[in-house]
Image (cartoon, rainbow, N blue to C red):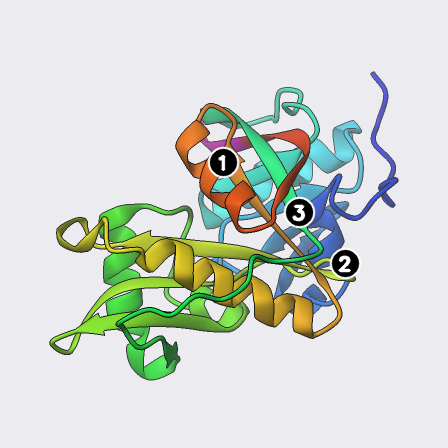
Amino acid sequence: MSSPATVPDHVLDRPVWSALNGRQAHLALRRGGVARMKPDYGLFAATADEGPASLAALGELVRELGDVGLVELAAPPPVPGTKVVSSAVCLQMEASQVAPAWDVAFEMLTLGDADAAEMLALATLTKPGPFFARTHQLGAFIGVRVEGRLVAMAGERMRPDGYTEASGVCVHPDHRGKGYAARLLREVTAKILARGERAFLHSYADNSTAIGLYESLGYRGRREVVFTVLTAA
């Protein structure tokens, strides 16, 4: 079995490994050849290679700290002491430019620690992707409130060198169809680009509606990756 190199050909080929061994190294727990995001921030993990020692260390972390999510170019080999909860092909997309801003009738608010409980509740309800108690601290988040209630948000997650991932885009079911998601994501993307970085995100490869929205904002498909969630066997 061939083992992927610790340093990928491109930082986005192994975004979790790149982030947790770069600008977000302070968020990583390490065991042998494994880096795992601290559980309050996320479930993402990556191994230095697919050798027996690294896979065994990954299995140990799953048993000790709970489920992990891997984002790689292919599904992982069997990991001792674990089983696969889910495996999905995703389209990784990136943007070097963004659609022009358009006027909207709602205010986009900066979100922070004071909003954390509502952000977690909204993400738990709408399931935009893994979201935990401190996920909102991974980057800047913005949102929309209606009558004081948080109904939509979008923000940043993984930060490989030169890139920031747009993530956490979600809208309460009672408030969909009002353009919140597109406008929030456009704003998040624009702020990433304004810092001199490129933006990227992930969509399930079969979600043509979401992919169409992202393309309208300036994102283009880069390559497919596999998102695998492992739990203790």
Identify the disc placed on residue 121: none
Q: Nearer the viewer, mark 3 or mark 2?
A: 3
Q: Residues within 10 Å of mark 1 (few under 14, many from 20)?
A: many
**In the rendered image of this protein, does residue 31 appear above or below residue 59?**
below
**Residue 213: where, in percent of width, then height?**
45, 42
In which image quadrant can residue 33 be found? top right
With 132 as the anchor, is 70 left or right in this view?
A: right
**In the rendered image of this protein, does residue 14 appear above or below residue 184?**
above
Q: Quadrant of the C terminus?
A: top left
State the predominant SS element of the stretch in magenta: strand
The answer to which of 166 and 13 lies nearer the viewer is 166
Q: Say if the magenta span includes residue 229.
A: yes
Identify the residue under disc 3: 94
**Circle 1: residue type:** Ile
Per the rendered image, the range of residues in magenta is: 228-233
Identify the residue under disc 1: 211
Identify the residue under disc 2: 21
